[in-house]
Image (cartoon, grey):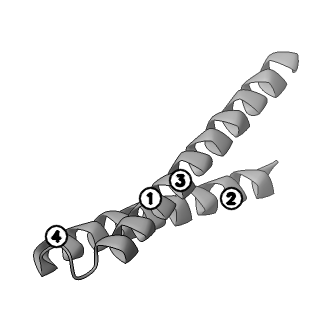
Amino acid sequence: MEAADDRSKQIRQLMQTEEKMLLAEINFWRQMIKSRRGVVSEQATERMQYACSLAERKLLMMDEIFSHKELEQ
């Protein structure tokens, strides 16, 4: 049972780290988009928006998985 608890804690810590990284990535892309709008090509802005959207979707999926796992316990 103790091993299962340790494993659960490790998974939680990994997910929290991943969440922090994704939030940092989202903030990075939002700042890039805001500061570079009008300076870079429209295509470059679209790529940055796509990268930001991808990180946001990953975060949402991760939150859904984490919430689902918490409900199972």
| Residue labelled with disc 1 | 28
Question: Which secondary structure, mark 2?
Answer: helix
Q: How far separated are the C-alphas under marks 4 and 2?
A: 36 Å
| Residue labelled with disc 2 | 68
Image quarter (top left, top right, bottom left or bottom right) of the N terminus: top right
9 vs 43, nearest the viewer:
43
Q: Answer with mark 1 or mark 2, whichever residue precedes in sequence.
A: 1
Q: Amino acid at mark 4?
A: Ala
Q: Quadrant of residue 51?
A: bottom left
Front: mark 1 or 2: 1
Q: Quadrant of residue 5?
A: top right
Residue 67 x %, y % = 71, 59
Q: How far separated are the C-alphas under marks 3 and 1?
A: 6 Å
Question: Which secondary structure, mark 3?
Answer: helix
Q: How far separated are the C-alphas under marks 1 and 4?
A: 15 Å
| Residue labelled with disc 3 | 24
Left or right: residue 48 versus residue 34 is left
Q: Quadrant of residue 62?
A: bottom right
Left or right: residue 26 versus residue 2 is left
Front: mark 2 or 3: 3
Q: How far separated are the C-alphas under marks 2 and 3?
A: 24 Å
What number is the disc on residue 44?
4
Q: Amino acid at mark 3?
A: Ala
Q: Does the CB distance between marks 3 and 1 fall below 8 Å?
A: yes
Question: Which secondary structure, mark 1?
Answer: helix
Q: How far separated are the C-alphas under marks 1 and 2?
A: 28 Å
